[in-house]
């Protein structure tokens, strides 16, 4: 049922038009064109332009991740194709987060769970207990970033649910960008929801009666691993409850 890619997976094919560290003219032109396109039209463009290449999306099943899985199903369903949904199970997820993931599997999503190479126990044996409290960057590297690196070896096109209004660190997210694999080759990174607001996201979720994490009805606004997620204390950006008080705002997968 789950796919856990190992480091022994064959090397990725080079991604022709993007095999440089800078965005090619074609991509810059497409970005300008897609800036005003709907999320569904961005997805249709990607599916047409990169037909035959390895397209997948990642989702942690936050509100926008749920919307993206739904939109991809709406776009790909009539085409008779299915795009895999990669999701990382750090071992520290809330039970409610696993429940919502499984609700989307029940709705037909091709969900592939990727786990860290170290179990929580193995991590504690190697690095000491509760690494998240002492060195959250190291913990995120082991439990989130390294698994994401493995996912990138399986993809030519990575579709992600991040939005510009989630936090200052995401406000310049392009519709089309790139991520870099360990060998320096590039993966096209697509953010169809970049222009969506939090209100847009909730409207789509509620209008379509989609499953969402029940913790979002209990004051949480962004949900990651249980030890590093709090209800935000005051009005701020929705990711304020993540790594609160630790001076950390991103796990690192969007820096790849
Ligand atoms: Fe570890 Fe916290 Fe990062 Fe999860 S969010 S991987 S528990 S530091």
Image (spheres, grey):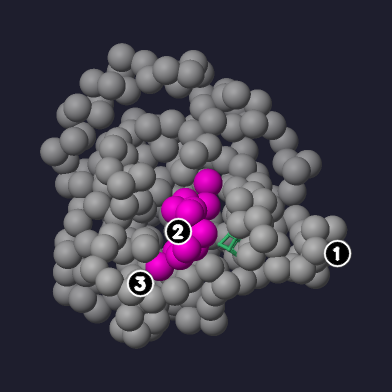
Task: Describe the element under mark 3 as helix, strand or loop.
Answer: loop
Where is residue 256 shown, x and y percent of the image? 52, 37
Query: According to the image, label 3 marks what residue?
Result: 232
Which mark is first along the chain, 3 or 1? 1
The mark nearer the N terminus, 2 or 3, is: 2
* Magenta run includes residue 158: no
C-alpha distance separating marks 2 and 3:
22 Å
Q: Is mark 2 on a helix, strand or loop?
A: loop
Q: Is residue 154 above or below residue 99?
A: above
Q: Could you tell me which residue is drawn at 24 percent across and 52 percent down? A: 165
Asked whether, in this view, residue 129 is left or right of residue 3, the answer is right
> Taking 166 as reference, is 183 above or below it?
above
| Residue 125 badge | 1
Q: Position of residue 242 (x, y in %)?
A: 45, 64
- Which numbered disc, 1 or 2, marks the residue that appears first in the sequence? 2
- Relative depth, front residue between 139 and 254: 139
Mark closer to the observer (2, 3): 3
x, y (%) of residue 29?
23, 21
**Residue pushed farthest right?**
125
Residue 117 visible in the shown view: yes
Please tell me whether mark 1 or mark 2 is closer to you in this view. 1
Q: In this view, does 4 lie above or below 159?
A: below
Question: In this view of the protein, which residue sits in the foreground, 226 or 78?
Answer: 226
| Membership of 248 in magenta stretch | yes
Magenta-tinted stretch: 241-252
């Amino acid at each position: 049922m789950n796919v856990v890619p190992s480091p022994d997976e064959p090397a990725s094919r080079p991604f022709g038009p993007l095999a440089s560290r800078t965005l090619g003219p074609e991509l810059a032109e497409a970005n300008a064109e897609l800036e005003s396109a709907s999320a569904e039209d961005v997805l249709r463009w990607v599916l047409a332009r990169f037909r035959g290449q390895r397209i997948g999306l990642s989702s942690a099943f936050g509100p926008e991740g749920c919307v993206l899985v739904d939109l991809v199903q709406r776009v790909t369903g009539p085409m008779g194709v299915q795009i895999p949904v990669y999701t990382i199970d750090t071992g520290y997820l809330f039970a409610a987060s696993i429940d919502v993931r499984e609700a989307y599997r029940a709705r037909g999503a091709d969900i592939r769970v990727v786990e860290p190479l170290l179990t929580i126990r193995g991590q504690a044996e190697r690095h000491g207990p509760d690494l998240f409290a002492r060195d959250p960057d190291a913990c995120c590297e082991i439990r989130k970033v390294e698994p994401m690196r493995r996912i990138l070896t399986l993809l030519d096109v990575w579709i992600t649910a991040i939005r510009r209004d989630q936090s200052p660190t995401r406000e310049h997210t392009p519709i089309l960008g790139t991520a870099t694999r360990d060998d320096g080759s590039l993966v096209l990174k697509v953010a169809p929801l970049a222009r969506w607001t939090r209100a847009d996201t909730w409207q789509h979720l509620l209008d379509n009666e989609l499953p969402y994490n029940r913790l979002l009805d209990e004051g949480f606004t962004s949900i990651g691993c249980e030890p590093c997620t709090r209800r935000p204390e005051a009005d701020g950006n929705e990711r304020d409850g993540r790594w609160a008080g630790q001076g950390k705002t991103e796990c690192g997968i969007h820096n790849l």
